[in-house]
Amino acid sequence: MVPIGHYLILSGLLFAIGTAGVFLRRNVITLLLSVEVMLNAVNLTFVAFGRQFGTVDGQIITFFVMTVAAAEAAVGLAIVIALFRHRESLSPEAFTNLKW
Amino acid sequence: MAFDLLLFYFFAAITVGGSLLVVAQRNPIYSVVSIVAAFCGLSGLYVLLEAPFVAVVQIIIYAGAILVLFLFTVMLLNASREDAAEWDRSHPYYRPGPTRVGVVLAVMLLGQLAWVVSRIPELQAGVGDAAPAASSVRLLGRVLFTDYMFAFEVTSILIIAAMVGAVVLAGKRGN
C-alpha cells in the first residue's frame, strides 16, 4: 500500500498551492478557486486518515466540507456579481472602500 | 504493490499539475477547467483510498455542480482577463512585496509539513495495513443519519441561509 505520509505531503502541497494562489492572484474568482483547492487538500487528509483507522468518519466529514464549499461558492459568487455591478472590475484592489 | 504507487503518482501528478495551472493561468475560464482536471485526479486518489462513494460525489457535486457555477459566473461577467494593470501602477506599495512574502509563507508551510511528516515513523506504514476498509454506502448512510444527525440538520440550515443570502446579494435592486 501507499504510505500515508505520501498522502499527507500531497495534501500539504495542494494546500500550499492554494495559499500561494490566494496571495498571488488579482482576480476575485481565482481567489475563490484557490480556496476550493485548499478545502480539497483538507478533504484528502480526512479520507486518508479515515482509511488508516478503518472508519467512515473521515468520508462523512468530507461530505460536510463539500456542503460548506457549495454554500461558500454560492454566497461568494453572489458577492462577486454584486461588486462587479458597482465597479466593473474583478481586482480585489478595486474594492478597498467599505461604502461608496 | 508497485502498481499502487504508480497509480498514486499518476493521480497526484494530475492533481498537482491542475492546481498549479489554476494559479498560473491568466484567464479565469482556463483556471476553472484546470481545477476540474485537478478534481478528477483527486477522485482517482479517493478510489485508491477505497472510498468510491466520495470519489463519485467529488465528480458529480464538485466538478459537475460547484465548478459549473463558477464557470457560469465567469461567462456571465465576461471577465476573460485580469484587469489589474492600472491598479498595479497606482498602488506601488502593494506589489510585489506582499506577494513575495505570501509565496515565501506558502513554501515555508509546505516545508514544515513535509519535515513533520518525515519525522514520524508511523506515517511510513502503508495506509491500509492496519485496518480493513470501511466504505460501503450502507455504512456511510447509517453513520450519517445516526452519529452525525445533528450536524446533518445544521447543514440544512446552512444551505437555506446560503440560498437566501445568494438571492439577496445577487438579486435585482429596486423592485
Image (cartoon, grey):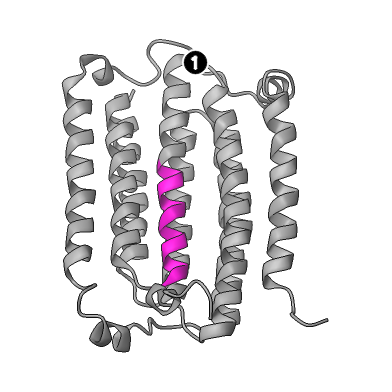
The quadrant of the picture occupied by the C terminus of chain B is bottom right
**Is B151 situated left or right of B26 in this image?**
right
In the rendered structure, does residue A36 fall within the stretch colored magenta? yes
Who is closer to the viewer here, A35 or B173?
B173
Who is closer to the viewer here, B129 or B104?
B104
Label 1: element kind = loop
User: What residue would you read off at disc 1?
Assistant: A54
**Is B147 situated left or right of A91 in this image?**
right
Give the residue furthest to the right: B175
Who is closer to the viewer here, B158 or A73?
B158
Give the residues in magenta: A27-41
Give the residue furthest to the top: B130
- Counting from the top left corner in percent of width and height, residue B15 is at 37, 50
Q: Is residue B159 visible?
A: yes
**On screen, residue B138 above or below B52:** above
**On screen, residue A4 above or below B54:** above
Query: What residue appears at the point 64 percent right and 23 percent down from the top-left corner?
Result: B136
**Is A97 situated left or right of B96 in this image?**
right
Query: What residue appears at the point 19 percent right and 49 percent down from the top-left corner?
Result: B107
Q: Is residue B1 visible?
A: no
Residue type indicated by callout 1: Gly
Query: What residue appears at the point 38 percent right and 81 percent down from the top-left corner?
Result: B82
In the rendered structure, does residue A99 fall within the stretch colored magenta? no
Assign the magenta stretch its main secondary structure. helix
The part of the image, by quadrant, that contains residue A28 is bottom left
The part of the image, by quadrant, that contains residue A26 is bottom left
**Is B81 situated left or right of A100 in this image?**
left
- Counting from the top left corner in percent of width and height, residue B148 is at 67, 24
- Provide the chain ID for the residue under circle 1: A
- Counting from the top left corner in percent of width and height, residue A6 is at 28, 32
The quadrant of the picture occupied by the N terminus of chain B is top left
- Counting from the top left corner in percent of width and height, residue B141 is at 71, 25
